[in-house]
Amino acid sequence: MVPFLKFLAIFVSAASGALGLLVDFKKDGKVTKPGFIALVGIIVSFLIAAILQGFELDSNKKAAIAEQQKTKAILDSINRGVYNIDAPNISFDVSARIHYNQPLFEKYNARLRAAFLKYKDNNNPLPEGTDRFLNENDKGQKNLVGFTIRPESPLFPDIKKEPLIYQLIGESMLDISIYKSDNLKSFQDTLSQDANLFFNTERAKTKLTYWFNDSTIDIQAGGMHPRMESYAWRNHGSIESLLDLPNGIVSFTMNANQDFDEATQHILKSIEVRMFSFNVRSRKFSSGSLCRRPVRYPEYYLKLPASMLETHLNIQCTK
């Protein structure tokens, strides 16, 4: 149709021009019949050309939009592959704090206090896996205020002699629930928890910082990957990539699925999570200001941003 109109416009324009050369447009100040026909031909050819130009502009616009959509689809497909959420490519880091002025820690505290007396002389070499935290006073003197204790340190909780303490702070694992942006309402309703993706992480040895002055132990665990046997089993929400999670939620509990007695469970509930990060390849979504829900075990959550392909640090709790 368009080629026909183009040829028609050319023909009408040429015919009108030829007619104008062969006849007089005006006679006695009035437009002659051939002149009128030539004028109509010029107008018709103009209208046809204008309509064709409009068609071409619209067609070019649609083609450009289609090309943009095609390019976006290709980029989305590439990004979905690059930022796919599978067990080997995601991990979690967590930092927490516990107060040790409780009966369960009595013998462990005595062991650490004895180490304090032994190693408060900064010239006395520390055992393997142990570092000092020193504080400088007004006189420039450096005093021992804490130990950094890694798993290879003899000051680390003993799995045989201090099994409950070891289970509480020597290892960490997380129960992770991930909710897509279109499923946030169910997260608000405690009676209809239906995570799009749920799994447990592998257990990870922790690094501890034992503080002598404020009766606390800082707990750090990093690089916790999903347990493969639990990962795919509960992925019923079609979460395959970061692109599935704008404005989504990552929630977790810490060390909750263990058979502790009531007193130990009470201590477990007192552990305060201070930092959490959800890592997917090169992307790190972290926060030191987590939302918390008062359920059986403390459940923390982090609301993910709208743009998932940027690196977001220090995301604040958003209700």
Image (cartoon, rainbow, N blue to C red):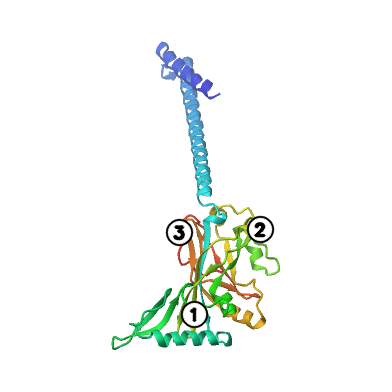
* Rendering coords of residue 189 (x, y %): 67, 68
Say few, some or many: other residues with alpha carbon within 10 Å of mark 2 (under 14 / 14 to 19 / 20 or more): some
Looking at the picture, which amino acid does disc 3 mark? Thr
Q: Quadrant of the N terminus?
A: top right
For label 1, the SS is: strand
Looking at the picture, which amino acid does disc 1 mark? Ile
Looking at the picture, which amino acid does disc 2 mark? Arg
**Residues under numbered marks 2 and 3 in contact, where contact means CB atoms less than 8 Å apart:** no
Left or right of 113 on screen, residue 261: right
Q: Name the mark nearer the viewer: 1 or 3.
A: 1
* Rendering coords of residue 120 (x, y %): 38, 85
Which residue bears the numbered disc 1? 217
Q: Nearer the viewer, residue 306 or 166?
A: 166
Say few, some or many: other residues with alpha carbon within 10 Å of mark 1 (under 14 / 14 to 19 / 20 or more): many
Q: Nearer the viewer, residue 242 or 212?
A: 212
Between disc 1 and disc 3, whose residue precedes?
1
Which residue bears the numbered disc 3? 311
Which residue bears the numbered disc 2? 234
* Rendering coords of residue 57 (x, y %): 48, 34
Q: Name the mark nearer the viewer: 2 or 1.
A: 1
Find the distance from the CA under tag 2 to the CA under tag 3: 27 Å
**Residues under numbered marks 1 and 3 in contact, where contact means CB atoms less than 8 Å apart:** no
For label 3, the SS is: loop
Say few, some or many: other residues with alpha carbon within 10 Å of mark 3 (under 14 / 14 to 19 / 20 or more): few
Left or right of 62 on screen, residue 186: right
